[in-house]
């Protein structure tokens, strides 16, 4: 058995779509800069990223003060240039999240030699993309394992491509709101899926992940966080482990402080750090 916490939001809208969304197509059309070129970029945007990162880091620490431990902050850089990642890295940040396998593969290749950088995949994952994902340099964690087929594919391919590497850290994604637009297993199925992951030799079960309600107009996200915590408790009971060994990846730009109130161990913040993304 391997249960651990890795240092770490993803939309399921991309699930089952063969063509990339227009924003990703526009991103892919641009030439990928080298890490050296990206690091050399200095403009108002890079300075704003550094200031935003400092502000979000402080907010995370303040929200976590009464909890006794600070959750990992995943800076979500999807559809942002490599220079944005380099700016945050220069400011001391190391954990970055991406939603699309192709974009992550390009950024991962360009930053393969960057010491300490850790990539977190937080998007919908199709089985035909597992091999490409597992080949990404510095891949640290996959937050979106929503079915046994994906868990088994990751286990097999990670072992083939990285036989000497540590097991790949993963979260089980749960659709806590029951919305068709979001990925994840049903809450009732989460303990069994966690058990499947636990049995995978080349994977480490890090915890459970969800995407809360996107806005106040759609409702308060706290019910989602409560459901995920309940799934965590049920999974821990089924696995015979303490609940503290299973993390909770939840909370984004608009609700990460609320997620911390509900014991999030990993929060995923994008636009508040990097600015608004291109329209879909």
Image (cartoon, rainbow, N blue to C red):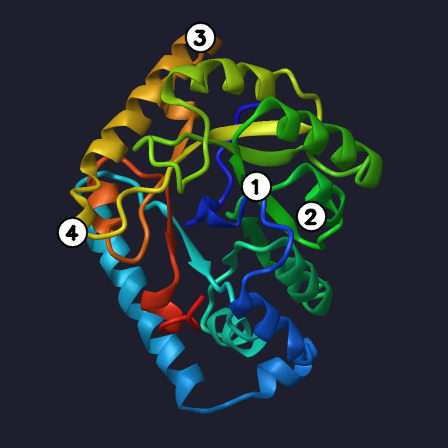
Sequence-first disc among 3 and 1: 1
Residue visible at 42% across and 26% down in the picture = 246
Sequence-first disc among 3 and 4: 4
Q: Which residue is mark 4?
A: 217
Which one is nearer the viewer's eye here, 68 or 232?
232
Vertical comparison of 42 with 161: above or below: below
- Distance CA(mark 2)–CA(mark 4): 35 Å
Residue 142 image label: 1
Percent coordinates x, y for residue 266 in the rendering: 39, 44
Percent coordinates x, y for residue 120 in the rendering: 55, 50
Task: Classify 10 Å Cα crowding around label 1: few (below 14), some (14-19), many (20 and above).
Answer: many
Residues at circles 2 and 4 in contact by the CB criterion of under 8 Å:
no
Residues at circles 3 and 1 in contact by the CB criterion of under 8 Å:
no
Q: Quadrant of the C terminus?
A: bottom left
Percent coordinates x, y for residue 215 in the rendering: 21, 52
Residue visible at 40% across and 42% down in the picture = 181
Residues at circles 3 and 4 in contact by the CB criterion of under 8 Å:
no
- Distance CA(mark 3)–CA(mark 4): 36 Å
Residues at circles 2 and 1 in contact by the CB criterion of under 8 Å:
yes
Residue visible at 33% across and 17% down in the picture = 233
For marks 2 and 4, give the one nearer the viewer: 4
- Distance CA(mark 2)–CA(mark 1): 9 Å
Element on which disc 2 rests: helix
Element on which disc 3 rests: helix
View extreme (bottom): residue? 43
Which one is nearer the viewer's eye here, 140 or 197?
197
Say whether residue 199 is left or right of residue 262. right
Residue 133 image label: 2
For marks 3 and 4, give the one nearer the viewer: 4
Q: Which residue is mark 3?
A: 238
Vertical comparison of 3 with 188: above or below: below
Q: Quadrant of the N terminus?
A: top right
């Amino acid at each position: 058995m391997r249960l651990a916490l890795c240092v770490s939001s993803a939309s399921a809208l991309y699930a089952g779509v063969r063509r990339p969304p227009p924003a990703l197509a526009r991103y892919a059309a641009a030439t990928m800069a080298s890490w050296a070129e990206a690091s050399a970029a200095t403009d108002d945007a890079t300075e704003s990223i550094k200031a935003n990162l400092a502000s979000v880091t402080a907010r995370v620490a303040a929200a976590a003060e009464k909890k006794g431990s600070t959750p990992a902050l995943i800076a979500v850089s999807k559809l942002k240039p490599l220079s944005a990642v380099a700016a945050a890295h220069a400011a001391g940040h190391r954990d970055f999240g991406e939603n699309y396998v192709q974009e992550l593969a390009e950024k991962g290749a360009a930053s393969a030699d960057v010491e300490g950088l850790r990539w977190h995949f937080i998007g919908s994952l199709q089985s035909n993309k597992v091999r490409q994902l597992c080949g990404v340099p510095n891949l640290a964690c996959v937050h979106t394992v929503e079915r046994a087929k994906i868990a088994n594919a990751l286990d097999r391919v990670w072992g083939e491509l990285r036989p000497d590497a540590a097991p790949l850290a993963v979260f089980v994604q749960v659709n806590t709101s029951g919305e068709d637009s979001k990925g994840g297993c049903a809450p009732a199925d989460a303990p069994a899926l966690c058990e499947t992951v636990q049995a995978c030799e080349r994977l480490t079960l890090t915890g459970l992940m969800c995407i809360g309600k996107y806005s106040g107009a759609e409702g308060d996200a706290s019910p989602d966080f409560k459901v995920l915590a309940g799934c965590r408790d049920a999974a821990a009971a089924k696995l015979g482990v303490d609940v503290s060994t299973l993390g909770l990846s939840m909370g984004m730009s608009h609700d990460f402080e609320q997620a911390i109130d509900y014991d999030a161990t990993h929060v995923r913040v994008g636009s508040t750090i990097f600015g608004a993304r291109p329209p879909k």
